[in-house]
Image (cartoon, helix red, strand yellow):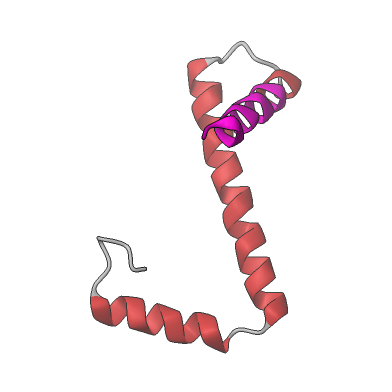
Amino acid sequence: MRALDTSVEAAAMQHRLHQALGTEARVALAKSASELAREFAKAGLRDRHPEYTEEELLRELANKTARTLDRP
Protein backbone atom coordinates (compact mmCIF):
# COMPACT_ATOMS: atom_id res chain seq x y z
CA MET A 1 0.00 0.00 0.00
CA ARG A 2 1.47 3.33 -1.02
CA ALA A 3 1.35 6.50 1.05
CA LEU A 4 -1.06 9.13 -0.24
CA ASP A 5 1.75 11.67 -0.56
CA THR A 6 3.94 9.32 -2.63
CA SER A 7 3.75 9.03 -6.40
CA VAL A 8 3.17 5.64 -8.00
CA GLU A 9 6.67 5.80 -9.52
CA ALA A 10 8.33 6.64 -6.20
CA ALA A 11 6.40 3.89 -4.42
CA ALA A 12 7.47 1.35 -7.05
CA MET A 13 11.11 2.43 -6.69
CA GLN A 14 10.88 2.20 -2.91
CA HIS A 15 9.37 -1.29 -3.21
CA ARG A 16 12.17 -2.44 -5.54
CA LEU A 17 14.85 -1.06 -3.23
CA HIS A 18 13.23 -2.66 -0.19
CA GLN A 19 12.99 -6.02 -1.96
CA ALA A 20 16.69 -5.81 -2.87
CA LEU A 21 17.70 -5.48 0.79
CA GLY A 22 18.69 -8.58 2.66
CA THR A 23 16.87 -9.73 5.77
CA GLU A 24 19.44 -8.17 8.09
CA ALA A 25 19.16 -4.78 6.37
CA ARG A 26 15.34 -4.88 6.49
CA VAL A 27 15.43 -5.67 10.21
CA ALA A 28 17.91 -2.81 10.78
CA LEU A 29 15.67 -0.45 8.81
CA ALA A 30 12.60 -1.47 10.84
CA LYS A 31 14.55 -1.05 14.09
CA SER A 32 15.71 2.40 13.04
CA ALA A 33 12.17 3.47 12.11
CA SER A 34 10.89 2.18 15.45
CA GLU A 35 13.57 4.08 17.38
CA LEU A 36 12.81 7.26 15.45
CA ALA A 37 9.09 6.95 16.19
CA ARG A 38 9.85 6.43 19.88
CA GLU A 39 12.08 9.53 19.94
CA PHE A 40 9.36 11.62 18.27
CA ALA A 41 6.85 10.38 20.86
CA LYS A 42 9.26 11.20 23.70
CA ALA A 43 9.85 14.67 22.26
CA GLY A 44 6.10 15.28 22.20
CA LEU A 45 5.76 14.18 25.80
CA ARG A 46 8.75 16.33 26.79
CA ASP A 47 7.11 19.36 25.14
CA ARG A 48 3.88 18.74 27.06
CA HIS A 49 5.60 17.82 30.35
CA PRO A 50 8.97 19.61 30.62
CA GLU A 51 9.03 18.81 34.34
CA TYR A 52 9.22 15.03 33.72
CA THR A 53 12.47 13.23 34.37
CA GLU A 54 13.80 10.78 31.77
CA GLU A 55 12.39 7.92 33.85
CA GLU A 56 8.95 9.58 33.98
CA LEU A 57 9.05 10.16 30.22
CA LEU A 58 9.82 6.50 29.58
CA ARG A 59 7.10 5.37 31.99
CA GLU A 60 4.51 7.61 30.33
CA LEU A 61 5.59 6.43 26.89
CA ALA A 62 5.20 2.81 28.02
CA ASN A 63 1.76 3.59 29.47
CA LYS A 64 0.64 5.30 26.27
CA THR A 65 1.90 2.37 24.20
CA ALA A 66 0.07 -0.12 26.43
CA ARG A 67 -3.16 1.89 26.20
CA THR A 68 -2.85 2.00 22.41
CA LEU A 69 -2.35 -1.77 22.26
CA ASP A 70 -5.42 -2.33 24.46
CA ARG A 71 -7.73 -0.63 21.96
CA PRO A 72 -10.05 -2.91 20.02
Residue drawn 71% across the image and 23% down it: 59
**Residue sitting farthest toward the top:** 51
Horizontal and vertical percent for residue 37?
A: 55, 46
Horizontal and vertical percent for residue 8?
A: 25, 77
Above or below residue 39? Residue 68 is: above
Range of the magenta residues? 58-72
Q: Nearer the viewer, residue 30 or 71?
A: 71
User: Per the image, is 59 magenta?
Assistant: yes
**Residue sitting farthest toward the right:** 55
Residue drawn 45% across the image and 87% down it: 16
Above or below residue 31? Residue 53 is: above
Image quadrant of residue 65?
Answer: top right
Above or below residue 17? Residue 71 is: above
Horizontal and vertical percent for residue 51?
A: 61, 10
Number of numbered labels in the structure image: 0
Residue drawn 49% across the image and 17% down it: 48
Q: Nearer the viewer, residue 71 or 15?
A: 71
User: Per the image, is 30 magenta?
Assistant: no
20 horizontally vs 15: left or right: right
Above or below residue 48? Residue 65 is: below
Horizontal and vertical percent for residue 22?
A: 66, 84
Q: Quadrant of the N terminus?
A: bottom left
48 horizontally vs 1: left or right: right
Image quadrant of residue 20?
Answer: bottom right
- Dominant secondary structure of the residues highlighted in magenta in the image: helix
41 horizontally vs 3: left or right: right
Residue drawn 65% across the image and 14% down it: 52
